[in-house]
Amino acid sequence: MKLVMLGPPGAGKGTQARRLQDSRNLVQLSTGDMLRKAVAEATEYGIKAAAAMKAGELVSDEIVIATISERLDQPDLANGFILDGFPRNLEQAEALDAMLEAKGLVLDAVIDIAVVDDVLVDRVSGRYTCAKCGKGYHDTMEKPATDGVCDKCGSTEFKRRADDNAETVRNRLEVYHAETAPLQDYYRSKGKLKSVDGMADIDDVTRQIEEELDAA
Ligand code: ADP
Ligand code: ADP
Ligand code: ZN
């Protein structure tokens, strides 16, 4: 399956993509993770992307499209993938269509996770991940069973993103509404859009997505 996860920052795209990765043997492709790695390694793209990420603005289409295009050629994606955080504007969506067509691939569905703005700042400000395995947590909404110990791998080290502060999140939300939300109409008109209620609890959202995919 070839899927896109759409939704504002904090909607649960990464959380749900990681679950689908395990349940359907797909590969999660997060442009945010790829860009953070490039920044940490101070590659040419990373150096160019850092300021926009810190401010909660979009990184240039050129960098993001080149990053995804190279990644889509890797052999580990044969069983399918979940794009998480890409595309984020119309130019990227059109570039993705062209890339997939050139590779003879077709998108199965675009999962749109709907969450109201009010709760997103809380979700993002309370978010952290296991430093070792990447499992996501939240200060109040998704805590490990034992305080300070990762459920999945037992690590006691966790990390928070520098851009997950209230001020930057508000800017990222504005960018989402201006640039990314129009993709709902774009994919609806192509018959690909599957909307789920992202206000429900995490397991319930997973069930909604699995139902949509079984019907797709
Ligand atoms: P995104 O990838 O869309 O930015 P995440 O998957 O990282 O969002 O989720 C943001 C935060 O909200 C995480 O801390 C996660 O544990 C929590 N979260 C995700 N889905 C839900 C949900 N349905 N209800 C409550 N909290 C959630
Ligand atoms: P979230 O889902 O919480 O908004 P991401 O990890 O997807 O966070 O993205 C973090 C930052 O990385 C964005 O604010 C933006 O600066 C950059 N970024 C990620 N994906 C893209 C993209 N497709 N186009 C442009 N910038 C991107
Ligand atoms: Zn872990």
Image (spheres, grey):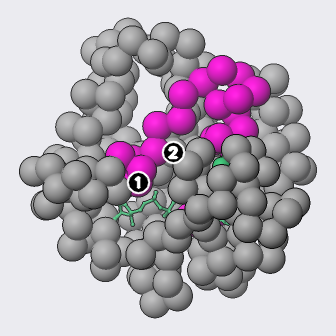
Image coordinates of residue 177 in percent, x first then y, are 48, 71
Using the rendered view, name the quadrant where residue 115 is placed. Answer: bottom right
Q: Secondary structure at mark 2?
A: strand
Using the rendered view, name the quadrant where residue 82 is placed. Answer: top right
Using the rendered view, name the quadrant where residue 2 is placed. Answer: top right
**Would the CB of label 1 be found within 8 Å of ligand 2?**
yes
Image coordinates of residue 126 in percent, x first then y, are 66, 77
Quadrant of the snapshot with the N terminus: top right
Magenta segment boundaries in residue numbering = 8-35
**Would the CB of label 2 be found within 8 Å of ligand 1?**
yes
The answer to whether residue 23 of the structure is visible from this angle is: yes
Quadrant of the snapshot with the C terminus: top right
Q: Secondary structure at mark 1?
A: helix
Residue 185: say if magenta: no
Task: For label 2, count other residues whose C-alpha is less than 10 Å away and answer few (under 14), some (14-19) or many (20+).
Answer: many
Which one is in front, 126 or 59? 126
Judging by the rendered image, the residue that carries numbered circle 2 is 84
Left or right: 27 as drawn, with respect to 17: left
Q: Are marks 1 and 2 in contact (CB under 8 Å)?
A: yes
Please report the residue visible at 78 percent of the width from the left and 51 percent of the height from the top. Answer: 151
Q: Is residue 85 above or below residue 78?
A: below
Judging by the rendered image, the residue that carries numbered circle 1 is 32
Please report the residue visible at 56 percent of the width from the left and 13 percent of the height from the top. Answer: 79
